[in-house]
Amino acid sequence: MENQYIPPKQWQFDSESGGKWAQINRPVAGSTHERSLPIGKYPLQLYSMGTPNGQKITIMLEELLAAGKSDADYDAHLINIEEGDQFSSGFVDVNPNSKIPALVDHSEIPGINVFESGSILFYLAEKFDLFLPKSGNDRTQVMNWLFWLQGSAPYLGGGFGHFYAYAPEKYEYPINRFTMEIKRQLDVLDKQLANNHYIAGDEYSIADIAMWPWYGNLVLGYLYNAREFLDVASYTHVQRWATMILNRPAVQRGRIVNRTWGEVWEQLPERHTAQDITDVLSQKP
């Protein structure tokens, strides 16, 4: 086949390859520069960006506050992954994997570092005793779907999203490969939601909070501009669920935190008080 790629005998890192997001990936771990993380006034300190993985945590924190858990108040500091903030020495101390989001709970002595979005959701659900059943089948089903999301979303983000939206060159094979998988995942969710009000049953849970920033944003047209390409309108149960979750005030609040793109009323790079969100949302037409 003409122009077929033949892998070299030994792979070498090409920092110029990969398009817009190439600079955030490299084949080694650790920090690239010295910089301490800022610490605000609340025990919960979030270091993140308003990507789908980041939205999971800000939505969770806003849901906890809406449920009356005042101890869940938080500072949200922007980690600009396009600028390499995730490779600072302070961030790497919290998350050796250099990926957002990361949380430090200073209500414990010493402070507890929590990284990986699924782990943070689980940690907060247990700490505040909300959005996760205590035991039995209900708890197991929530955990099933939380782990499903953690394993499936990389195909949507790093797979489909990369090759369809961000790769510097478009190739048929990877786009077809990941499109097939994303449509299969949407079908899994659609069949599950045909018989369940929420992802894991009758109760809103961390499974929904984890899922919505990826699959809710996707079917509502907020992710990759791929609604027509994926025929998302055909997944009627996912559409119903995604709209229902978006209508929650805490979701509307959490989705704009640490965000630096979109409409003016969707951008709140840092959050340090509840009023910060109110001020930004007040600009919505």
Image (tube, rainbow, N blue to C red):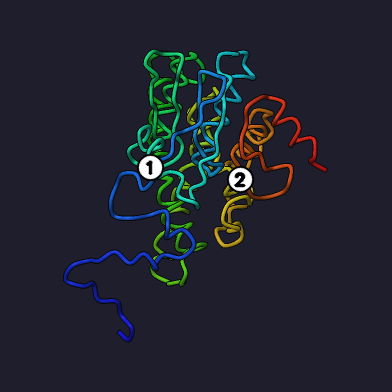
Q: Crowdedness of circle 1 by 10 Å Cα count: few (<14), some, many (20+)?
A: many
The residue closer to the viewer here, 195 or 57, is 57
Q: Amino acid at mark 1?
A: Ser
At mark 1, the secondary structure is loop
Residue assigned mark 2? 236
> Which residue appears at 56% of the width and 42% of the height?
50
Q: Earlier in the sequence, mark 1 or mark 2?
A: 1
Quarter-of-image position of residue 172: bottom left
Marks 1, 2: nearer the viewer: 1
174 vs 183, left or right, is: left
Image position, residue 80 (x, y; %): 52, 46
- Identify the residue at the far right of this view: 285
Q: Crowdedness of circle 2 by 10 Å Cα count: few (<14), some, many (20+)?
A: some
Image position, residue 198 (x, y; %): 55, 30
- Identify the residue at the far bottom of this view: 2
Q: Amino acid at mark 2?
A: Thr
Label 1 vs label 2: CA separation? 37 Å
> Which residue appears at 46% of the width and 27% of the height?
121
The quadrant in which the C terminus is found is top right
Residue 244 vertical position relative to residue 1 in the rendered view, above or below: above
Image position, residue 243 (x, y; %): 66, 39
Quarter-of-image position of residue 106: top left
Image position, residue 200 (x, y; %): 48, 28
Residue 10 vertical position relative to residue 145 in the rendered view, above or below: below
The residue closer to the viewer here, 64 or 11, is 11
> Which residue appears at 39% of the width and 32% of the height?
115
Residue assigned mark 1? 98
